[in-house]
Amino acid sequence: MPKKTQAQLRHDCLVLNTAEQVLILPIQEILYVKANTSYTLFVEVSGKVWSMSKPLRHFETNLINLGFFRIHRSYMVNLQHLRRLDKVEGLAYMINEEAVPYNKDHAKKLIQLSEE
């Protein structure tokens, strides 16, 4: 029997298995993902936050395949919802004007990807 992973892909959803429940989060509903020590927080457009007991690096490959980009050591943003990078403040703004910090080197990679 194959080992089940913490996060599995299901078409346009991310399936997260917790001790209490199985979460099925539509990708378009996830605004960004934040590392919080050994936990990962999934933040939805609605403001709902889901906490998973695995570090962000555990989810990174799956999230990249789903259109997320690591914009900071502690943040991955859903590129569907990213609207602008403020060079003065060092913040990335999402569709609802919520802001997360970004790293200039990561931003350069994002710009390079857009030019390819």
Image (cartoon, rainbow, N blue to C red):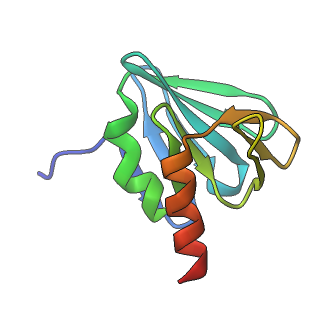
| Side of 29 relative to 33 (left or right) | right
Q: Is residue 14 visible?
A: no
Q: Please state the horizontal and vertical placement of residue 48, each as a whole percent of the image.
A: 73, 28
Pick the residue in front: 88 or 76. 88
| Side of 36 relative to 97 (left or right) | left
Q: Please state the horizontal and vertical placement of residue 4, each as a whole percent of the image.
A: 24, 45
Q: Please state the horizontal and vertical placement of residue 60, each as a whole percent of the image.
A: 39, 47
Residue at image x 48%, y 46%?
15
Residue at image x 71%, y 61%?
80
2 is higher (above) or lower (below) than 48: below
Q: Please state the horizontal and vertical placement of residue 41, each as a whole percent of the image.
A: 55, 27
Q: Is residue 115 visible?
A: yes
**Residue at the right extreme?**
96
**Residue at the top extreme?**
37
Pick the residue in front: 5 or 57. 57
**Residue at the left extreme?**
1
Residue at image x 40%, y 34%?
56
68 is higher (above) or lower (below) than 71: below
The total of numbered circles placed on residues is 0
**Residue at the front extreme?**
88
112 is higher (above) or lower (below) than 81: below
Instruction: Answer with the quarter of the image where residue 52 lies.
Output: top left
Instruction: Answer with the quarter of the image where residue 82 lies.
Output: bottom right
Pick the residue in front: 83 or 21. 83
Residue at image x 54%, y 41%?
103
| Side of 96 relative to 111 (left or right) | right
